[in-house]
Image: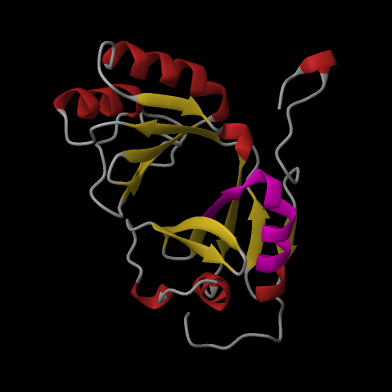
Amino acid sequence: MSNTENRSLVSALEGATYQGFAEVREIGLQGMITLRGDLGSKEMQAAVKKSTGLAVPQQRRINQGTGKNTGKNAGKAVAWMSPDEMLVMVPYDAVAECLAAIDKALNGRHYMAVDVSDARAVFQVSGGAAGEVIAKLAPIDMGALEQGEIRRSRLAQIPAAFWWVDGDTVQVVCFRSVAQYGFDLLKTAAETGTEVGFIA
């Protein structure tokens, strides 16, 4: 979303939250870059390290920063999306700087780096039963999903990617165009009184 006519930048659902047996929260603006190319090349590995402080992830893995307010990789993550694609996540206001660093490092190489921040919505599901919320909606075994793994799958009728941020928090990315539907799915799955108790 542009800042035309002095309008404030807003995320898809402006930080909507719901508290059930787990909390569902849209996290707000998140910088995201789709980066495609030869993930195994020295140049790509150097570009990712230079721009995020993180290594290129292995297949179906996500490398996350410390999450602290200081440090080179704070608030950053790099996720494997396909054999030639990664999703680079940085603070929203750091996207231009990150893109410039990638472009400089990969100058002359075959690659694509595109800002997709405003085309995505990001949710966090937190609490001891966060995994159960996702398990109700996605055809994967959340009990077997390790921290550091990422899955591209579906939540009911929409494509989504998700991973454990920590032992009690799952992060979910979907297209902005279906953000309300995604939030409503997560909200319904988290309604108190609908607990299954299989995943905790």
103, above or below 18, in the image: above
Colouring chosen for the image of the structure: secondary structure
* Direction front: furthest residue: 110
The picture places residue 37, in percent across and down from the top left corner, at: 29, 31
For the point 72% across and 42% down, the residue is 12
Q: Does 83 sit left or right of 182 as displayed? A: left
Q: Does 25 sit left or right of 111 as displayed? A: right
Quarter of the view holding residue 45: top left
Q: Nearer the viewer, residue 198 or 84?
A: 84
For the point 75% across and 46% down, the residue is 13
For the point 50% across and 22% down, the residue is 94
Q: Which residues are magenta?
A: 172-186
Q: Does 141 sit left or right of 198 as displayed? A: left
Is 182 part of what is drawn in magenta?
yes
The picture places residue 124, in percent across and down from the top left corner, at: 57, 56
The picture places residue 188, in percent across and down from the top left corner, at: 72, 73
* Quadrant the N terminus occupies: top right
For the point 27% across and 23% down, the residue is 47
Q: Nearer the viewer, residue 15 or 179?
A: 179
Examine the rendering and report whether any part of residue 48 can be seen.
yes
